[in-house]
Every structure is written in C-alpha cells, then in structure tokens.
Amino acid sequence: MPDSARPETTRFAPSPSGRLHLGHVHSALFSTRAARREAGGRFLLRIEDIDSARCWPEFEAAILEDLAWLGLEWEQPLRRQSDHLDDYAEGLERLKETGLLYPCCCTRRDIQEEIARAAAAPHGPDGPLYPGICRRLGEEEAAERIAAGEAHAWRIDIEEAQRQTGPLTWHDRGRGDLTAEPGLLGDAVLARKDIGTSYHLAVTLDDARQEITLVTRGEDLFHATHLHRLLQDLLDLPVPEWHHHGLLADEQGQRLAKRHDALSLAALREQGRSPAEVRAMAGFPD
C-alpha cells in the first residue's frame, strides 16, 4: 500500500498535437495536487513530441500558456522528448541485447491480410493483435532485409519476455495490487520505422529518468501499463505507482479529445471562463 505521507514526484506529459481540453486539466491538477500534498513533493512537465509529423511548436507554446493561466507551476527545466532521442536509442539497444526483440518489416496491409486469413486471430483491448509474421523470420533473412534498406520496426517477443521475467505485479491507486498481463498488447512495437522509439519505450524510460513515483493518466492507457511494467523489469528500472483516472465526456457522452474544440481551454477562455471555473469543470473546485 502507498505511504500517504511520502512526498510524491508526479508529472503531466501532454503531446503538442492540439490544444488542451478539460480531460488534460483533470490529469494535470490531480498530479500537481498529489505532489504538493506533502512538503518536498515535485511536479514535473514533460512534452511528448517524438511524433514530429503531428507535434508542432505552436501547440507546445499554447500548452505552456494554458497551464500558466490555470495557475500551475512546474519544476524547471521541462523535459522535451525530442531532446532525448539518444536515451531511447540506448534503451532500445539494451533490449536488443536480451534477444527479445525482432525486426518487423510488415506493412499495415500485410498485417490486415494475415489477420483476415487466420481462423481465429487473437484480440487485445484495441482489436486484433499482431499475428507474428516476422517473428517467424530467420535471423539471416531478417539481417538481409535490413541490410537491403527495407523499412522495419522493432517488436518484442512478448511470450518469451514473460518467460524471462516471470510473474510481475504493479499497484494502481484505484484498483489495488495487480498482476501484470503484458500479453494483452501482443508483440508491441518498441521502435517505430520513422522515429526510432515508441510511446511505450519512451515514457517508461522518461518516468525512470525523472524519478516519477506516481504516474497519472487516463484509463484508456490502463492496458499499456501492463507492458510498461514488463519493460521496467527488463531494463532494471524503478517501479512507480499509477493512478488511472476516468475519461471526461461531453454532453453526448463522447470521450473528450483534442478534436473537441468547444471544450478546449482556448475556447473556454474565449467564453470568459475564469481559471477557477475551469478547474471546477475538470473536477477540482477550489
């Protein structure tokens, strides 16, 4: 069980691919208040901008402006993922040394066609899992395809990884102690063809590097935490605790997303809402 008197190190980690909305405000406020509950707590800001095709400097500037308008303060300097690609490359090499990663040259069409041919393709929380096409490649063939310049990602052999680590557990502040089930996501991609890392690898390494003790994020990422717990064990990283909060919805019951411009902080500010009103709308009345 968590020590409620222990100073927390928390983080808010938005992606600068759009404007912040009320769901982001809820996560940021939960994190900062957890950090400030006891003397010595730390609240950190991380900009998750590894996807350069979707992330833009103007959105990062807007995020900083919105958070300052809300009255939030964070420890400087902030961590920007695009400044730390070498960290992720090093982590990927460490995982390659375990023998648990394999190159995947599949296109989306290859995967879809293989799934269509399967009589009963395994499914995860987000749909059909990767069917393991490239896991069956021999080392020589895989090396030849890479040497020929064929685009490839790096996937983890999840079954073998679980055999190596054995059973793992993690603690969610809302659900208690849980047994890790990293197989829920199948042979997940840990390094993308166009970036060299993935969300899963980058955030796991970031949280360790920033000494995060409590990871706060939406329940849509609950299943990802099972995989992150596995990566922590494989990379000999410290294990934080997690809080997965419910997802805020609009009046029609649809999950808030960056496309909900009417509930963005920018729109609410234009409507004349005060910071206190917005904090209350996000579930944190002063």
Image: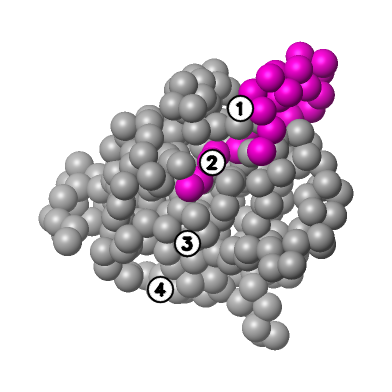
The residue identified by callout 4 is: 285
Q: Residue flagged by tag 2: what amino acid is it? A: Asp
In this rendering, the answer to whether 159 lies above or below 142 is below
- Rate crowding at label 2 as few (under 14), some (14 to 19) or many (20 or more) other CA atoms within 10 Å: some
Give the residue displayed 55% in from the left and 39% down from the top. Answer: 156
Percent across and percent down for residue 164 are 36, 39
The percent coordinates of residue 22 (x first, y second) are 57, 66
Please tell me which of labels 2 and 1 falls first in the chain. Answer: 1
Kindly report which numbered mark, 4 or 3, lies closer to the viewer in this rendering: 3
Residue 41 place in picture, x, y as percent: 25, 45
User: For the residue labelled by badge 2, is the local secondary structure a helix, a strand or a loop?
Assistant: loop
User: If you read the primary sequence from the N terminus, does the residue marked by circle 1 or circle 4 appear first?
Assistant: 1
Q: Nearer the viewer, mark 4 or mark 2?
A: 2
Nearer the observer, 116 or 249:
116
- Looking at the rendered structure, the secondary structure element under dot 3 is helix
Decide which of tag 1 and tag 3 comes sooner along the chain. 1
Compared across the picture, whether 253 is left or right of 146 comes to: left
- The alpha-carbon separation of the residues under discs 4 and 3 comes to 26 Å
The disc, 4 or 3, on the residue closer to the chain's N-terminal end is: 3
Name the residue carrying label 1.
82
Q: Residues within 10 Å of mark 4 (few under 14, many from 20)?
A: few
Task: Tell me the residue that label 2 is attached to.
Answer: 157
The answer to which image quadrant residue 286 occupies is bottom left
Specify whether 111 is left or right of 225.
right
Q: Label 1 neighbourhood size at 10 Å, few (<14), some (14-19), many (20+)?
A: few
Q: Is residue 111 left or right of residue 60?
A: right
The magenta segment:
136-159
Would you name the residue on which mark 3 appears?
222
Task: Quote the CA–CA distance across marks 4 and 2.
Answer: 46 Å
Magenta includes 152? yes
